[in-house]
Image (spheres, rainbow, N blue to C red):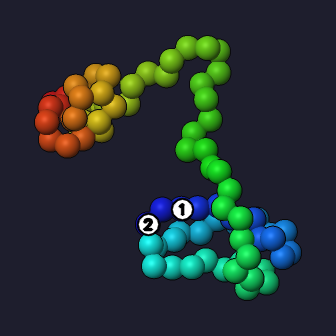
Amino acid sequence: MPLYGYACKSCGHMFQTLVRSSDVPTCPACASGDLEQQLSLIASPAKGGSDPEPVCAGGGGGCGQCCGMGAGMGLGGCG
């Protein structure tokens, strides 16, 4: 279930909600279905201009940098 951010066009309320493919979200403040889906960032960019260290602590993770491509799919791994 993906988490989406919305802005209600009726009352201006901004909120996030989990949405299944068959669900139609409504505003929790006014129950309107007139919503605008917002872009959301997963993580903020690293500061200082350097690349972040890969996160592979022996369990794979599929970063492709330290574990090999496809590690998250069982095609390679860290340990």
What residue is shown at x 61% (from left), y 77% (from top)?
Answer: 25
Judging depth in this view, the residue of 37 and 52 nearest the camera is 37
Q: Secondary structure at mark 1?
A: strand
Judging depth in this view, the residue of 54 and 10 nearest the camera is 10
Look at label 2 and name its amino acid.
Met
Residue 68 % position (x, y): 22, 25
Residue 33 % position (x, y): 70, 80
Q: Which of the labelled discs sits on residue 55, or is there none?
A: none
What residue is shown at x 84% (from left), y 76% (from top)?
Answer: 10
Residue 2 visible from this viewpoint: yes
Residue 22 % position (x, y): 45, 79
- Taking 63 as reference, is 17 left or right? right
Residue 58 % position (x, y): 23, 33
| Residues at marks 1 and 2 touching, judged by CB atoms closer than 8 Å | yes
- Mark 1 — residue? 3
User: Which quarter of the figure is the N terminus placed in?
Assistant: bottom left
59 over 33 or under it: above or below: above
- Taking 13 as reference, is 33 left or right? left
Callout 2 environment at 10 Å: few (<14), some (14 to 19), or many (20+)? few
What residue is shown at x 79% (from left), y 84% (from top)?
Answer: 30
**Res 62 quadrant in image:** top left
What residue is shown at x 77% (from left), y 71% (from top)?
Answer: 8
Residue 28 visible from this viewpoint: no
**Marks 1/2: CA distance?**
7 Å
Look at label 1 and name its amino acid.
Leu
- Mark 2 — residue? 1
Q: Secondary structure at mark 2?
A: loop
